[in-house]
Amino acid sequence: MDAFFLPIGSGQRFAIYHPAEGGRTRGLVAYVHPFAEEMNKSRRMAALQARALAAQGYAVLQLDLLGCGDSSGDFGDATWQAWVNDTVQACHWLRLQNDAPLWLWGLRAGCLLAAQAAAQLHEACNFLFWAPTPAGKPLLQQFLRLKAAVDLTSGNAKAIMDGLRQQLAAGESVDIAGYTLSAALASGMEQATLAAPPAAGRLEWLDLATQSDARLSPASAKPLQAWQSAGF
């Protein structure tokens, strides 16, 4: 395992590289972490999975996106497009290491970023989706509600939500649960959808369920069907 800083633009991103074990590299895996506090809560599981993949012959790169973790910048500096670009650069770095098949492994909102980044790469990509978020708009709404939750009992929740929306629409940043959310990041997230890139590869879609016979929700089933129709 190698920890280093990857230069991107005028800053640098903290990265952890897990070389493939066993002599032959079966694939290259770029991990795209989830949004805000979900990133911190999933760090241990992501690290365990990265090591497990490396043990199976996959080279894995874990990258902290702009303003996240130990990467340069503050969270408030981040934009959705900057995160997409970070993901693209992570894939470029991996490609320099080996010519094995490329995988993008996303968790929650990371799946949205992975799909958009793949559309900018000139090769067929494979995907490992963990609990993918079908669209960014519901995720943004959920995040904004954290601010309103403190006033649910007072009946001011709607007014707070409206105020947050107005601030973002005016190009202002908002502070929520210890994170400064820029208007550019909110706008990009709200417009993001889990659309399949032009070049089809392999797709492994893993979702969460409380019962063994559970089916995908309609919100997840629709984009999955679209990916399958695109050849994945």
Image (cartoon, rainbow, N blue to C red):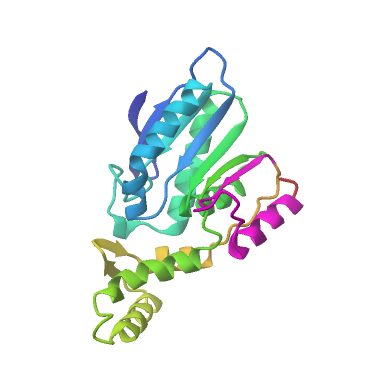
Report if residue 122 is visible in the image: no
Report if residue 162 is visible in the image: yes
The answer to whether residue 142 is above or below residue 115 is below
User: Residue at position x 59%, y 23% from top?
Assistant: 26
Residue nearest the viewer, comparing 1 with 95: 1
Residue 232 picture quarter: top right
As drawn, which residue projects farthest toward the top?
Answer: 23
| Residue 132 % position (x, y) | 53, 53
Residue nearest the viewer, comparing 170 with 216: 216
Q: Identify the image quadrant of the N terminus.
A: top left
Residue 45 picture quarter: top left
| Residue 30 % position (x, y) | 49, 37
User: Residue at position x 32%, y 48% from top?
Assistant: 41
Is 202 part of what is drawn in magenta? yes
The residue stretch that appears in magenta: 201-229
The answer to whether residue 93 is above or below residue 147 is above
| Residue 148 % position (x, y) | 30, 76
Is 214 part of what is drawn in magenta? yes
Residue nearest the viewer, comparing 231 with 188: 231
The answer to whether residue 176 is above or below residue 54 is below
Residue 209 lies left or right of residue 166; in this view the side is right
